[in-house]
Image: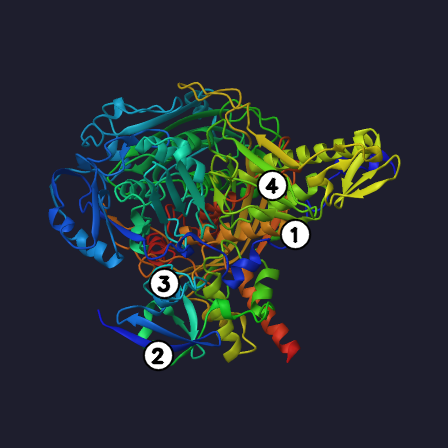
Amino acid sequence: MDKSQKSKDKIPAPVGESIPRVDAREKVTGSAIFTDDIQFGPGLLFARIKRSPYPHAKILKIDASKALALPGVKCVVTGKDYPGFTGLYLQDRQVFATEKTRFVGEPVAGIAAVSEELAEKALDLIDVEYEPMPAVFDPEYGTTKEAPLLHPKLGEYTVANFIFPQAGTNISNHFKIRKGDVEGAWKNCAAIVEHRYQIPHVQHVPIETHIVIARAEDTGKVTLWSTSQSPFAQRNLIAKALDISHKDIQVIAPYVGGGFGCKAGASMESLIVAIAMKVRGRPVKLRLTREEEFYTAFVRQGLVAYFKMGCDKDGNLLAMENKFYWDSGAYTEYAVNMTRASGYSSSGPYDVPNVKTDSYCVYTNHPVTGPMRGFGMPEMHAGLEQCIDELAYSIKMDPVKFRLLNCVQGGDIIVTGMVMHPTGLSECIEKAAKAIDWGKKEKASAPHKMRGKGIALMWKAPAMSPNAGSSAWVELNEDATLTVGIGGQEIGQGTHTVMSQLAAAALGVPVDHVRIAKPIDTDVSPYEWQTVASRLTWSMGNAVVNAARDARQQIVDMVAKAWKEDPDDLDIVNGNVISYKSEESISLKDIVIYGMPKENFNGWIGGPIVGRGSFMPTYVTGLDPETGQGERAVVHYTTGCQAVEVEVDTLTGKVEILRAVGAFDVGKAINPELVRAQMEGGFVMGMSTAIFEELKLKDGVLQNPSFVDYRIATTTDAPSKIDSIIVEVPQDDGPWGARGIGEHSMVPTIPAIANAIYDATGVRVGSPPYLPEKVYLALVDAGVVK
Amino acid sequence: MSTHKITVKINGGLEQVEVPSNMTLLSMLREKLAMTGTKNGCAAGECGACTILMNGEPVNSCMVLAVEADGAELITVEGLAKEGELDVIQKTIIDKGGVQCGFCTPGILISAKALLSRNPNPSEAEIREALVGNLCRCTGYIRIIKAVHAAAELQKEAA
């Protein structure tokens, strides 16, 4: 055998193979364990939360004496017990409100009792007196001088160094982009488009609601069993909020029944720890009802966005001026960083020489917002991509051609001054346009229906702390199988499968030899920042590959020593160490635990093999707070596009999505079918937010907290056909070139549908959701129907 | 709260359970019998995660009182595979990639199973209609619909 054939020189199997999900069998037989399935026996207590009925109010009095007198009630906890402040980037929030409540549903007290029923009954016996205060329900109004101040102590809160709260206002972060000369550029524009969009709050709607069980021991140790996307971040946040040492908090997180961002960080988890610490020794369970899930954990940010953009007569984009007012709700958590992320990506995936953006994070008396699939990008692209479309038409250029002319390419100096890495966006556009038969007008299925096609582009970078890290271990077993320790969560995306593939490929064993250690347990699992930002395949993947390579090197060194060969001549293939030189071969079995005998049994070499690996990007730089310019704002961008064909019923206004195409540059698809599954699932979720979803808030009170009144896409709404096209321009620091795809597939969906509605009817529908009545009235206003 | 002793056949085995009058069938399965394969997604009959077969018909077990099931025959997700051999719908949902987080999967499988037993040759529209009460936030449904198609085909071949 030739050395050049060594597996490390090419992309090894099973990278790039669509192996079946490793967690599928458990999940189809009902044996997969989710948090609510864990059994705690008769000692289990149940918690319920007393919540504010007012969007903004002073708390005058809390009297829990009647509740405490009820037999079976074990404790009542209020803000007095835990007055400290918490928050991911800006510490603006208490576990239970003390002086004021700032949203309907804000916790003011918690109860533990022997049954859920009793806890619920006891809630009604807690007497809370409030004095309602004027509130803010609109982020734009929230920035004005007339608006009531929701956080008078904003200037005193502890804050991360890349977030800029404006004391004395409701603005918790202001991010600016000043690139080129926008004012000077307008006069060179042949066409200018200017619009305002309002994107409503929506909810993630995982089918599994938030559930946490906590147990505090006399020793001070606290254990949580939690529906968490980020067990380590949760540990960190709770440790800080409740002043407990990290080593004394253990977060155990089994399979997550859908997260989409709402199970990231900590939302309701600190509540249960605070309660558990009052009933030491007994586990306490808090399970959000579906109604609570709709507005008391996390909802998606609302957005009021202004876009102004212009191009020359040949279609070259010259300038963009954007203003974003992000409605963060009562507390900020992730929203301050999303404000930043939408700012540093505010040009969209385009090469624009002059950009001015002001992105504001604004407190309102709406539910607390958290990260949701796309992290601000679906909301921002919703308006941006409709404006791009309109701009193309206004200079009579085909929208696909316009996008190909202006889309970002490797080497471009992007909005933050960073040099764009190689990207396959043009290829995505060309392939998607071809797949949807762009330019070919199809006949509508009925005389009262209008048919059209639309396209929209996207880009998104993992929005995270610049130095978010991953780690992994790989432990070999006697039979040459391996157990892989990771700290990232399986939330449906298929990360256990992908990590198995990466570990198998990097070590040189069949993939069915790999088992991912679970549940994730912060006492046992290696550190992982969070399962967010579509970063696991890339970041945790690198850690797993590094750990497997570390184990591989230990094995090869041991065998080389035993065989008296050069380690460089050895390789591990299909679970056997082989020598390209002597053509010797030995199975990994036993030697990975017991080592190998020296010559003439004169002692031993080696020992149990454990590989370790970690990964942390070290190259992200800060940005100038006045201009948003810097050398490298982000780790990388995943780019792509979607194209759709729709039919609009002119009698009802109903929009039907007939077919869809997605094309994304994922760097390298480790498991192509899982990548396509993300593209499909993301499209339908995006489609659902485009045509159905809106949290209807009236003076801060949610009007539709149920699946009957808050409709999400069902089987009858999904299009018959979604083409998913994988483009692969490798990421220089991804495992075999891979980048993330989890969130990106719902980013361009709203504008792709809006642009298709325009193509069908000639009417711009603007802000989502495109409900039948909204579309119908827009058609009437435009004179399309009479 | 008064309690009642009821007898049910679950996945082929007889069980006698003492249940409070207001206990739902879902709570009985999950809390009394620790059969946690059936999921609780809304407790209001809206999401379909708790779907089981009761006397052959799919029901939202959160909307049925346990006492109503006295004497009934129940099939839950745990009862689909026989002696380690997966049911055809379990196989095809894996093959077609119709599983992601897995939380809605038990209810989807039961609804699909009910459809295939009353209509061995369903059209795409009939599959969509049969599963309309089972919400899934991950997959976008297309692969699930394909899996039901494929299961119908395999069933026909086997017959």
Which mark is nearer the camera, 4 or 1? Answer: 1
Q: Are marks 2 and 1 on the same chain?
A: no
Residue displayed at 28% across by 55% down: A704
Against A543, is A672 above or below? Answer: below
Q: CA distance from mark 2 to mark 4?
A: 54 Å
Q: Mark 3 and mark 1 in contact? Answer it, CB < 8 Å.
A: no
State whether residue A202 appears in this view.
Answer: no
The residue beneath circle 3 is B31
Q: Chain of mark 3?
A: B
The amino acid pointed to by label 2 is Asp
The amino acid pointed to by label 4 is Val
Against B4, is A560 above or below? Answer: above
Q: Are marks 4 and 1 on the same chain?
A: yes
The residue beneath circle 4 is A666
Report helix, strand or loop for mark 2: loop
Label 4 CA crowd tier, 10 Å (few <14, some 14–19, many 20+):
many
Against B47, is A216 above or below? Answer: above
Report helix, strand or loop for mark 4: loop
Q: Position of residue B123 (x, y in %)?
A: 54, 73
Q: Mark 4 vs mark 1: which is more N-terminal?
A: 1
Q: CA distance from mark 2 to mark 3?
A: 17 Å
Q: CA distance from mark 3 to mark 4?
A: 43 Å
Q: What is the quadrant of the C terminus of chain A in the image?
A: bottom left
Residue displayed at 62% across by 73% down: B153
Q: What is the quadrant of the N terminus of chain A in the image?
A: top right
Q: Nearer the viewer, residue A150 or A251?
A: A251
Q: Position of residue A387 (x, y in %)?
A: 44, 39
The residue beneath circle 2 is B70
